[in-house]
Amino acid sequence: MRVIFMGTPEIGVPALREIVAHGHDVVAVYSQPPRPAGRGQKEQKGAIHLAADELGLEVLTPRNFKNPDDVSAFAAHDADVAVVVAYGLLLPKPILDAPKHGCLNLHGSKLPRWRGAAPIQRAIMAGDTETAVMVMRMDEGLDTGPVAMSEPIMIAPDMTAGELHDQMAALGADLMVRALAALERDSLAFTPQPAEGATYAKKIDKAETRIAFNRSAAEVHNHIRGLSPFPGAWCEMALGGEQQRVKILRTETTSGSGRPGTILDDDLTIACGSGAVRVVRLQRAGKGVMSAAEFLRGSGTLRGQVIADG
């Protein structure tokens, strides 16, 4: 089939590679324009852009589809279908209607729960125990189109967003090539989403990444793993005579009580509003990721320190 692939971050790379490997003709790849990143703020291509370059595919990076020339260029590819994986733009109707079979989106949630930009993080932060990766046909709404195929995924109690992301990327790639095979046979059926149970997974805001230890241990644990490894949930600790930002990347819930934010022992157990969390992995500003034991060897005892008022 003639396929247009549309995506930007790493989660879509396995799907792009699988589509190419299964012999489909990827006539163009659309990705968000390179963005300034890093200390030097040099423009960097997204993961999909880099993968497409490696595969020798044409890459187009319009900022939006408000320019009629960009819409015409899209339609001129004469594609059978467009595959969309975390592209980063709402597509206007002329783009949705241009491919013969429309646009298929690979979405990382159990729709209609967690429509929107951050379904992986929001599912974990909410304490969900199950999610899914789904192939749906896009319409003008935000993740409101009918669903064709779904693969359920269990969310383990300590699974991080990064781990769920990687599992979803692999499962999603397989699901999408199966969907394209069914579409090619004219046997891909679509079911409207239920009207009940819709929730919105808004983009993660920097203001919500600070850890509030006055919440329950389960809520703190879910917040931390839902933001791990990126952007990372953080707190400030007194280290070397000054307050330093520390990202907490992995915890486990445990028993313990005290003023929220108090370090209760020499294993980096921190009291929460109810219960406690034990830090397993963390990262000081400007340093690499380390275990709690490695961190404590370099900082000495922190028992009794209150790192947040909650």
Image (tube, rainbow, N blue to C red):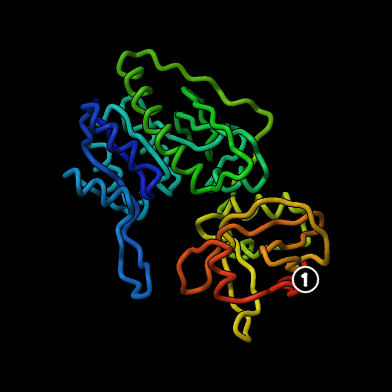
The quadrant of the rendering that contains the N terminus is top left
Q: Is residue 19 above or below residue 257?
A: above
* Residue that appears at 19% across and 43% down: 55
User: Residue 262's spot in the image, x, y percent?
Assistant: 76, 68
Q: Secondary structure at mark 1?
A: loop
Amino acid beneath label 1:
Asp
Q: Is residue 267 above or below residue 9?
A: below
Q: Disc count in the image?
A: 1
* Residue that appears at 62% across and 76% down: 300
Question: Residue tagged by mark 1?
Answer: 309
Q: Is residue 162 above or below residue 133?
A: below
Q: Quadrant of residue 11?
A: top left
- Mark 1 is surrounded, within 10 Å at the Cα level, by few (under 14), some (14 to 19) or many (20 or more) other residues, namely few
Q: Is residue 4 above or below residue 285?
A: above
Q: Quadrant of residue 209?
A: bottom right
User: Residue 205's spot in the image, x, y percent?
Assistant: 58, 60
Left/right placement of residue 56 relative to residue 155 reads: left
User: Which is nearer the eye, 76 or 16?
Assistant: 16
User: Residue 31's spot in the image, x, y percent?
Assistant: 32, 49
Left/right placement of residue 67 relative to residue 149 reads: left
* Residue that appears at 59% across and 62% down: 248
User: Which is nearer the eye, 32 or 242?
Assistant: 242
User: Furthest residue to the bottom?
Assistant: 241
* Residue that appears at 62% across and 84% down: 242
